[in-house]
Every structure is written in structure tokens, then in C-alpha cells.
Image: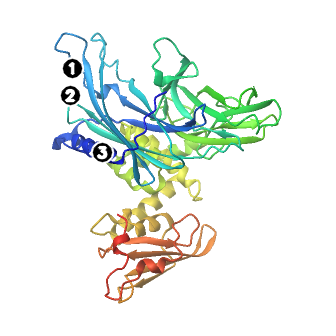
Amino acid sequence: MRFAVNKNGNLVWRLALFACSLFFAVPARSQTVPRLKPGLDAAQFQDKAQRAYLEIYYAVPEAAIKYLPADNGKDPACRLLLSLQIYRDRTLWASKVWKIEKSRPDTLPPGALAPQQLVDVVSYLLDGPGRYRMTLHVKDLQQTDRLDSASAEITVREFRPEEVEISDVELASSIKPSSAGTAAVFNKHQQEIIPNPAALFGEPASQLYYYFEAYHLIKNIAGENYKTFARVQNADGEIDASVGKGMRPKKKIFDASVEMGGIDIGALPSGKYRLFYGLADSAATVLASRSKEFYVYNPALTTAPPQAVAAANLAGPLQGLNEKALDDEFAQMFFLTSNDDRKFYKNLSTAHAKREFIASLWQNASSEAALTSLAFRQQYLTRAAEAGTRYKSPLRPGWKTDRGRVFILYGPANQIERFPSGTTTLPYETWTYDNLKGQGGVSFIFADRTGFNNYEQIHATLHGELQEPDWQRLIARGSSGEDINANNVQP
């Protein structure tokens, strides 16, 4: 296992600035060149000394990399420059810049690299809990207009010794016994584990492999036996009984255990799923569980469960959209999608694949709105178009503003009160909904703190929304009429 922790703040910032100067000096035509589309993912584990560490997985499609013949007649080789920045909460925590040079046989037939990925693992010891955000930039040094990046986030936890704890899961494209040629970064407990950072499975590889670890078993599990499980959940959160196996009994021997296996997802229709995994006691009472999103692309599947059939009803409206229109529609679905959804969509290269994925997202989102997927899509996009007109500002389109988001997700308010700029307060608005998600008298407060008609949401009483009980402080002016909070406005 490799560990590299950078604690020198000055060095970190110098590396970050150096990386920026290398990566952003690219020709203007770079936007029209096919993208490298790297995959990026991470998982938290604990070592034998009970130190928490982070594994970061990345992959670059081999078909997007340029291999050039060597001057000395040797096999063609590629040269990549990579830059990784890791932020803990909002502070730059670690940074790394490195090169990769790799050769391949000159006898490979055309198209042989298409399904292959250049995969690696980088590991860091952790300081403690927090939200870690990673950004990876990749540049092909042999075609300098090839530049791309990927981002991922992970919430690092504290593994408490008084409870059974499980690690994050590493999704893998392959797990098999290690051999003499296994790279150290892929070798875990005598197994070669090749990560799948894009979390995309399906045709032509129908097997999803997983690896996770469990800790603090001896004192926290009664008896000599326990059970482990890894099952697939569909879009409705239901366990798909046709995929995978039930709970698997195990004997409690050590304080930590390794859990791995494979699930055949060849019968799943294209869409988003979750791997639900964890440990249970001998009576099948769940002791610890977590879940991880993954994606399936099986375009040749001819049969589908009811939820996939419902999603297919969108084929008509979506079929008439070209790839640009699909990209625009997906962009407007921002408030319905996660970072993983957006990362997955970025890796889709055909209009057909994008249509299937967008249809599945509309179907998932409509399940909470008591509307058909077609009706929900129409309502959402109609509101987005109206928000684009109502709430546009010099800084961003109307549907991307805070007021636009609330209008799109919750519809028009029952009452809106507008308060213009005064000697003691900045301009602000109060939106009131009589009933929202079963909650009565819901209010949203928006304030223009920058003076550019950019009304930001500063408070709401709806559960799950941003709440700031002392919101009046955020709109107060000083005695001179200037905004006393101007220096605290976040970009």
C-alpha cells in the first residue's frame, strides 16, 4: 500500500499553482477535440494499526490517449501529465503532480484499446473526519489540446471501536487471485482488485465486483457467527430479488474481516441502481450497512421490469431531440441530479445512451411527485423555461438562480412580499407556501446582497432547506447605508 500525505502548506500551494499553469495553457480549439473523460472515485478504509486512510481511484480510456512510435524503434508509447488536488472542507489538504509514460505492443489490431482503461490507485493517510473533495486534471502531452478533468467527493467518518463499522465499498471491474505480475496498488489480501471509478457496468462486461471491509467485530457481535450481504436496490429503493444472493453466513475469527464478491447484472435494464451492503448478526438483524450508486448500460436488453417500461414511455418526446438538445435538457435537470449522475452523463458518448439515462432520471424523480414521468417532465421543463424569463440576472440564467430553483422544484408561491432597498436593509423577498411537502406556512427568504439583482436564498423554514434563524442580520446595512456583511458574501 502506498501512502503520501503532504503537510507543508507552502509546498502544496506551489504545486497547485504549478499544476494550473501546466493545465490551462492549451490551444483555443481544445473544446472541439474528443475528451479524455477520466473516471474518479474514492473509498475510506482502516489499516492494521487502525489508522484511517483514503484510496483514490482513477481511470483514463485508452482509446482517447495518443500513442506515438518511439525514435529508437520500440513499441509506441503515451505520455500523460496528471494533477490531483484534495480539499478538506474548504482548505487545500494535499496536492500531487506526476507523469505517466506507458508503451503498448505495436501489433494490436484496430479498436483493441476501445474497451480498455488506464487505471491506478493513490492512497493517503487521513487526519480526521470531514468532507473531502478531489479534482483530477489529465493532459495528453502528445496531443496538447487533449485536456479533461473529473471531480469526486467523500465524507470521511470516524470508525468507533464500540460499534461494528464497515468501510466504503470499492466497485471493481475484476477481482481474482494475485499473481507475480500484480501491481502493488491492486493487491489486497492476496487478491488483484481492479477498480472501476466510473461505476459503469453492463454490456459487454455483465459482472459487478465489490470489496469492502468490516471492523471491531470481536466485542460487538454476539456469538461466533454473523452474516454479510451485498444486494442491488432499484430506483424505488427496493431490493431486486432476482439479482445476487441473500445473506452469507461467516464465522467470527478476527476483529476485522474482508468481504468481496461478484454480482451478475446482465439482466438489469439500463439505469441507475444502488449496491446495498453490510453485516448482520446470526439472527439476520442488520448491524451496519451502507450503499453505493452504480450505473448499468444494457442497450440490447429486450425485457424490462415495470419501472423501466414506464421510463420507456418517454421515448417519444426524447426521440425527437438531437444530442445538443439532450445535453441542454440534462443541464436543466441539475436540481434533480447528483454529482455521480453528472459524472456518469459526461461519460456517455451517444445520443441513444443519453436518452436512456435521461428517461430513467425522469422516472426516478417522478416517483415522489405523484405524477407520471411524462407529466413530471413537462411540468419541470415548463417551470424551468418560465424561471429563465422571470429570474434572469446579469450573473446567470434565470433557472440557475436560487429563486429559479425554488420555483422549479416547488412551483409558484401562494404569496410573495417584496421589500425594496432601504436605509437599514438590503432588498429582499419573502415567498410563502400554504402547504409544501405536508408542512404548512413554509417561507423562503431571498436577498440581493450584491446589488446585481442576484437574489440569494438566505433562509427557509422547509425541512431540508438552508435555514438561518438570524437571517435579518444578513440583510442589515450599516449606519452609512453600506452592506455591513459585504465582506462575508460567498461567491
Callout 2: 10 Å neighbours few (<14), some, many (20+)?
some
Residue 204 at least partly seen: no
- Measured along the vertical axis of the image, is residue 370 above or below residue 77? below
The answer to whether the residue labelled 2 contacts the one labelled 1, judged by CB atoms less than 8 Å apart, is yes
| In the displayed structure image, the side of residue 184 where residue 142 appears, left or right | left
Is residue 21 shown left or right of residue 466?
A: left
Residue kind at label 2, given as amino acid type: Gln
Residue at image position (45%, 68%) is: 407
Structural distance between the alpha carbons of marks 2 and 1: 8 Å
**Residue 16, disc:** 3
In the drawing, does residue 109 fall left or right of residue 186?
Answer: left
Residue type, mark 1 in image: Leu
What residue is shown with label 2? 142
Under circle 2, the secondary element is loop
Please identify the quarter of the rendering in which residue 293 is found. top right
Q: Is residue 94 above or below residue 426?
A: above
- Contact flag, marks 1 and 3 (Cβ < 8 Å): no
